[in-house]
Amino acid sequence: MTGLRPTAPAVQVSEEVARALAEGRPVVALESTIFTHGLPRPRNLAVALEAERQLRAAGVVPATIGVHAGVPTVGLSTGQITELSAVDGLDKVSLRDLPVVAALGRHGGTTVAATAFLAHRAGIRVFSTGGLGGVHFGASESFDESADMTTLAATPVTVISAGVKSILDIRATLERFETYNIPVIGYRTRKYPGFYVTDSGHEINFSVESPEQAARIIESRDRLELPQAVLIANPVDPAKQLPPEELDGILARAWAEAERRGVTGNASTPFLLDFIQRDTGGRSLEVNVEVYRGNVRLGGEIATALAAGAGDAAADGAGAGVGAAGDAAAGDAAAGDAAAGDAAAGVAPAGDAASAAVADTGA
């Protein structure tokens, strides 16, 4: 058609990230809300850049994800991270907000939901964050549940977190994960962590003891062509957690203060987290940073294990469960149909996405 202006790519993937994906090297996605909304200045920028350095030192390519001037970007530059970390009134971008912020040309920090979607769109398999969203207390009346859960139910990435935020209804959140068929795997534990604390008091069914075991679960999920995320619950070091009995008292005071001030809805989470930080004299902030470091480290290790074993796993999968040449051919045909469907939907395998992204960035 004539008279239409050419449009920019829907998602911009940095040249570094695109090349790493095309070459099969390990890449870990990082969200931007941790430095746009989660941490105070100037600590926010220091933590964001430290996470990137931590991954590079381990031979892993970091892909910090956010929206810069309306462009959803996978692999923000240092300059872009610096800029976003200093902007006042920045949009907090969940998946529903992504097209709006993009169309209006605004800056935004991406939540777990939006980051997971963009990571998968680019072909990144591993995403490290701090804590997940979930079911809020009183959700049976308010219907206040995070979009993280529904997005992860339909986005086959691997998310490393220290559980869900401590202010949430953890029991109800775990029930929702089960309803959405999202596997929750403890890393060297069967006790589900509670972000600031190592043990939330809730048990989970499975655990892994190594990044390689986690990688095998991820490969198994992918061979089965299941659509949901795999959640790896990585507890903070017990020596660095907030004392659990202290946290219980802090949360009780925080909720009482929120009720006294009439704080509800979207304003609840930032209010409660700020209350916890002030009530602990900043100690909760140090736990928050330690949680993030641990999850970034484990994400790098799992991404490295996937990159090292992807070929072997693919070879194993190619011969597994195939009893005859005809069955194998049928499986190949089905795979081709699935690939065609992905292409029509705009979601490509990692290699194709990376190649397209390189072209988009002019590499």
Image (cartoon, helix red, strand yellow):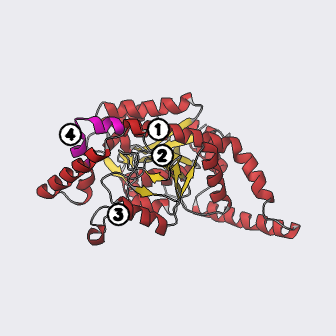
Judging by the rendered image, the residue that carries numbered circle 2 is 234
Q: Which residue is mark 4?
A: 278
Which badge, 2 or 1, is on the more N-terminal residue? Answer: 2
* Lower sequence index among marks 1 and 3: 3
Task: State which tag comes first along the sequence, 3 or 4.
Answer: 3
For the residues bearing labels 2 and 1, Cβ distance under 8 angstroms: yes
Amino acid identity at mark 4: Arg
Observer-side mark, 3 or 4, equals 4
Q: Quadrant of the C terminus?
A: top right
Q: Which of the marked residues, 2 or 3, is nearer the chain's N terminus?
A: 3
Q: Work out how far the residue at label 2 is from the one at label 3, CA to CA, in angstroms.
A: 22 Å
80 and 319: which is toward the camera: 319
State the CA–CA distance, disc 1 to disc 3: 26 Å
Magenta stretch encompasses residue 15? no
Q: Are marks 2 and 3 in contact (CB under 8 Å)?
A: no
Taking depth in this image into account, of 161 and 150 the one nearest to the observer is 161
Q: Which residue is mark 3?
A: 145
Q: Is residue 281 magenta?
A: yes
- C-alpha gap between disc 4 and disc 1: 23 Å
**What residue span does the magenta drawing correspond to?**
273-287
Quarter of the image that includes the N terminus = bottom right
Report the amino acid beneath label 3: Glu
Badge 1 vs badge 3, beta-carbon distance below 8 Å = no
Give the distance between the C-alpha atoms of the residues marked 2 and 1, in whole angstroms: 8 Å
Q: Is residue 78 visible?
A: no
Answer left or right for 67 relative to 74.
left
- Left or right? Give the position of 331 relative to 192: right
What's the CA distance linking mark 4 and mark 2?
A: 25 Å
